[in-house]
Amino acid sequence: MARAGKILSIRPAFLSKTSVKRRFPFPLSSLTAVVVVTVATLCGISTAPAEAQPGSETESKIESKTTPASEPAVVAVQKALPAVVNINTERVIRRTYRDPYDDIFYQFFGGGRVRPRELRQKVQSLGSGFIVDASGYIVTNEHVVERAEDLKIQVTTSDGKTYEAKYITGDAEADLALLKIEAPKPLPFISLADLSPNLLGQTVLVVGNPLGYGHSVARGILSAANRSIAIEDLELKNLLQTDAAINPGNSGGPLIDLSGKLVGVASAKMAYGGQGVPVQGIGFAIPASVVAEKVAAFRKEPQGEAGGSYASSAARKRFGLTLQDLTPDLSEAFGVEAGSGVLISDVEPGSPADESGLRRGIVIFHIGNYAVSSVAEAEKLFAKARQNSRVDMGVGIAQRRRGVVLQKIQIVSMVPKG
């Protein structure tokens, strides 16, 4: 048999240029290729690409490019997961209860009334959060850790260690809170200095503690921005929308991109539409830029002083009051002279403040014989209140009628608890 090289060099005499054009409607180069493949096959020469042999260097390179460990989502999770924490809270709800037969007995027979009984109920909740500083500062949703003075806050890190967390401060309108844990060594964290660009359509990952299943991951895209939602009497604005699964327990956890950078904080999901139609794939997150701004403001607030720490608030702990300084805008809205009074922003159900009739939106002008103009002043006075002693306060309720603010001042008395 002739060698393949010689056969390939032969041009048959009958294949002249004229005859090729007449007899073969395809190019001569195509016929030559057919001859080459045919001769190579007859000679036992393989024309297929060489396959990587098991254990060869080529096979190793191919595997290194296709292994799941190198997928961007996997790398991003491995980068962020050590900074994600599970938050377990336990708070005590106090409610007063009076036996109806006591009132009947008093009505017919007189005498002293029996003091109302106090019922205590423990309420547990689960949520997520993430470390934003190596010293142990943690960001989560405010609704996860609300009423912190009655809370026992436990934080579990990705390595299984559990810490008692301290509530530093929070913002109910932004639905963000800052916690602090003490660890013997620096902790891994998600940086607030290098944030995701938050581009519509980019892949996002939700990492958190849904339904108590610790450190779970859900994947989706960034669906929209600048969304607004209303939850009871609270309106959240400028939110991100995603189709990544956000379930109960994910609240407070991070939303990250494929480089592990923070996109936002998982906050809420839409379960039903306007007509009660079930909805899927619509979740909301607080943008990372808002988180970074709020955390910077939180850390500037004084800690361990009256008004600086929600958890150390005497007004909250002893009377069930959450107080807020009156800004110039709020003072104008309530018809209050600037620099006068403090605003009640929340009242704990069943607390002394609740029993005395105090409600959110009422302004406290003086406590005892002392006028107050800031939360710090009010906290100092509340902290001095003795157990079982009555505290009198001058409060004002503002109402706007036909554009005119009418204010009613009255005296309210409370007895602090514990």
Image (cartoon, rainbow, N blue to C red):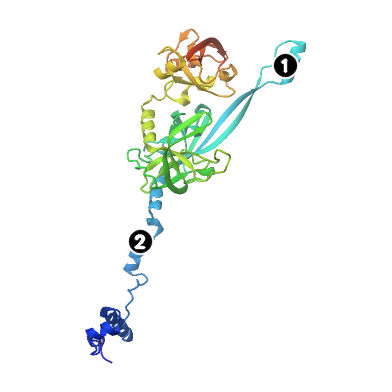
Residue 207 position by quadrant:
top left
Q: Secondary structure at mark 1?
A: helix
Is residue 127 among the parts visible in the rendering?
Answer: yes
The x and y percentages for residue 75 are 38, 51
Q: Residue tagged by mark 2? A: 64
Dot 2 amino acid type: Ser
Percent coordinates x, y for residue 90 in the rendering: 55, 33
Q: Earlier in the sequence, mark 1 or mark 2?
A: 2
Mark 1, other Cα within 10 Å: few <14 / some 14–19 / many ≥20:
some
- Local crowd at mark 2 within 10 Å, few (<14), some, or many (≥20)? few
401 vs 230: above or below: above
Disc marking residue 103:
1
Q: Is residue 11 left or right of residue 210?
A: left
Foreground residue among 255 and 282:
282
User: Which quadrant, please, contains the N terminus?
Assistant: bottom left
The answer to whether residue 90 is above or below residue 9 is above
From the image, which quarter does the C terminus lie in?
top right
What is the residue that sits farthest to the top in this orientation? Answer: 369
Q: Considering depth in this image, is 214 or 397 the residue closer to the camera?
A: 397
In the picture shown, does residue 44 fall above or below 404?
below
Q: Amino acid at mark 1?
A: Asp
Q: Give the image location of residue 48, x and y in percent.
A: 33, 76
Q: Residue furthest right?
A: 108
Query: Which mark is on residue 418?
Result: none
Image x and y of residue 223, in percent: 43, 44
Q: Can you tell which quarter of the image residue 173 is in?
A: top left
C-alpha distance separating marks 1 and 2: 80 Å
Q: For residue 390, say whether it is visible.
A: no
SS of the residue at dot 2?
helix
